[in-house]
Image (spheres, helix red, strand yellow):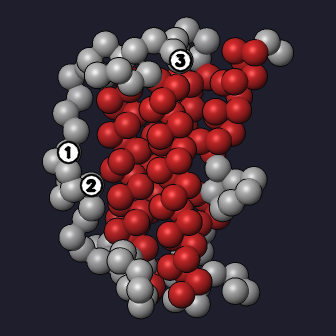
Amino acid sequence: MNNDAALREQIAAFLKGGGAHAGFSGAVADFPAEKRGALAEGLAHSGWQLLEHLRIAQWDILEFSRDAKHVSPKWPEGYWPKELAPADEAAWKKSVASFEKDLQEMIRLVKNPKTDLYAKIAHGDGQTILREALVLADHNSYHLGQMVDLRRALGAWGKS
């Protein structure tokens, strides 16, 4: 495997998560419906708010990376839902599915040998696809850690 292909595989693995920390699927799997809107002492967001923030931010980074006409939501209110809980089970499932779909799209973009990882994004101000992929992986990892902490505090994480 050449260096370019190896780098793309490593970035894809970083985006998928896991390894040294919980990946997305592990963090949201079996999250009790009755606790998705709960707050825990000392933590600022509910599981629903974290899930939606992850979904919205990832969508924004993906679309910025591939669409010059994309308009980002207003910061910070466009990135965080006001509601503590999802409207219903369907809303939770839709958000999870959307996150997973957009994650796969970003991985496809990174793994595509036609994608120049180092070229400045024409409509940006110095960003590259490599930078956006790393920012996304870092952002997801940070907030998935918050999700795990929340679940632990709510007694909804394994045998913590």
Q: Which residue is mark 3?
A: 117
> Which residue is at the front of the view, 138 or 150?
138
Residue at x 23% of width, y 29% of height: 70
Residue at x 51% of width, y 34% of height: 133
Q: Earlier in the sequence, mark 1 or mark 2?
A: 1
Q: Is residue 101 visible?
A: no
Residue type marked 1: Pro
Q: Earlier in the sequence, mark 3 or mark 1?
A: 1
- Mark 3 surroundings: few (<14), some (14-19) or many (≥20) residues within 10 A: many
Residue type marked 2: Tyr
Contact (Cβ within 8 Å) of mark 1 with mark 2: yes
| Circle 2 SS class | loop
Q: Is residue 160 above or below residue 122?
A: below
Q: Earlier in the sequence, mark 3 or mark 2?
A: 2
- For residue 145, the mark is none
- Mark 2 surroundings: few (<14), some (14-19) or many (≥20) residues within 10 A: some
Q: Quadrant of residue 83?
A: bottom left
Instruction: In the displayed orientation, state which residue is furthest to the right.
Output: 1
> Which of pointers 3 and 1 indicates the residue nearer the eye?
3
